[in-house]
Amino acid sequence: MSARNKEIVEKVNAAFAQNDVEGFLSFCADDVKWTMVGDKTVTGKNDIRQWLASMDFEPPKFTVDNVIAEGDLVASHGDMTMKDKDGKTAPYSYCDIYRFRGDRIVELRSFVMSTEGKQMTN
């Protein structure tokens, strides 16, 4: 199932890149729960649809560095740019963790952190 779930997350990432909310929701269970860690949790397709529609924003531009699947979990991480609350484009890193029930996403935990002014060191 891990390979199939990984394929679904790759399709979800493509839907997000095109600002295709319905494309994303087509892979979700009706009772899906999306937690933006440190911000809010939204439960249910209809509430997620309304929450996304209420935001006046451009979809982020992002790159996917890795998609890792194990059992009913898939993690996707990379970098993105999106407009901050002042309308200025800013860089971020993200990690999304998806949990599946069968072939439907039942939980999404999104970790997003600003990387503006930060340098990565080894």
Image (tube, rainbow, N blue to C red):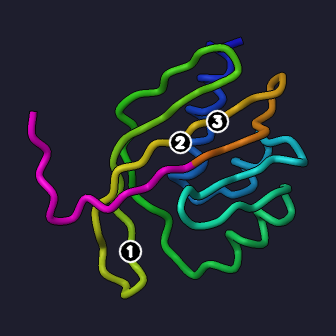
Q: Say which mark, if any, is on residue 98.
A: 3
Residue hosting label 1: 83
Q: Is residue 92 magenta?
A: no
Distance in Å between CA atoms under marks 1 and 3: 24 Å
Which element carries disc 1, helix, strand or loop?
Answer: strand
**Screen quadrant of the N terminus:** top right
Query: What residue is shown at x 61% (from left), y 46% (from top)?
Result: 109
Rendering quarter of residue 64: top left
Task: Identify the mark at residue 45; answer none if there is no mark.
Answer: none
Question: What stretch of residues is rendered in magenta?
Answer: 110-122
Proximity of marks 3 and 2: CB atoms separated by less than 8 Å: yes
The residue shown at (85%, 56%) is: 44
Q: Amino acid at mark 1?
A: Lys
Q: Position of residue 122 (x, y in %)?
A: 9, 33
Q: Secondary structure at mark 3?
A: strand
Question: For mark 3, does the 10 Å Cα neighbourhood hold few (<14), some (14 to 19), or many (20 or more) residues?
Answer: many
- Give the image quarter of residue 60: bottom left
Amino acid type, label 2: Asp
